[in-house]
Amino acid sequence: MQNHRALLLLDEDVWPGLAKALRARGIDAVSVHELGRTGLPDEDQLIFAIQEERAFLTHNIADFVGLAVDYHRQQQTHFGILVAPHLEKGILVHRTMALIESITGVELRNTVRFI
């Protein structure tokens, strides 16, 4: 699905090179490392992702699934949360690409997806 792809913001626990690898493949992705946003609370990172209309990719399942539940209960919108296990870099690129190419940004909104 070429049109209406999700935009991504990568958490500081995700390999920063993933953003560059995804951009080389036509995905609009940026890492919090590139933006100088490391060391901030999880909720602040998610709020920033929402302001930027980006889905948030993280390895931090416990905290971000909890935030997704809170957002759902409060009927607040987010642009998606992607949770990935720690994977070899090439596999992480491949799985992230496969997900982003199989779903639109609209379909990703207010969901948690596992890579």
Image (tube, rainbow, N blue to C red):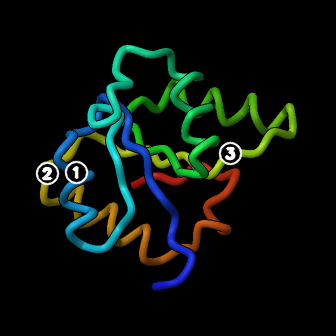
The type of residue carrying mark 3 is His
User: Where residue 108 appears, x then y in whole percent?
Assistant: 61, 61
Answer yes or no: do the residues labelled 1 and 2 have beta carbons within 8 Å?
Answer: yes
Q: Which residue is mark 1?
A: 18
Q: Label 1 crowding class (10 Å Cα cut-off): few <14, some 14-19, many 20+? A: some
Tell me the SS state at disc 1.
helix
User: Where residue 56 appears, x then y in whole percent?
Assistant: 49, 44
Q: Which residue is mark 2?
A: 89
| Left or right, 8 with reference to 95 | right
| Left or right, 14 with reference to 79 | left
Question: Sequence order check: which comes first, mark 3 or mark 2?
Answer: 3
Q: Label 3 crowding class (10 Å Cα cut-off): few <14, some 14-19, many 20+? A: many
The type of residue carrying mark 1 is Leu
The residue that appears at 42% across and 29% down in the rendered structure is 60
Residue 99, quarter of picture: bottom left
| Left or right, 73 with reference to 14 | right
Residue 76, quarter of picture: top right
Q: How many numbered circles does the render carry? A: 3
The label nearer to you, 1 versus 2, is 1
Q: Which of the labelled discs sits on residue 78, or is there none? A: 3
Question: Sequence order check: which comes first, mark 1 or mark 2?
Answer: 1
User: Where residue 109 appears, x then y in whole percent?
Assistant: 67, 57
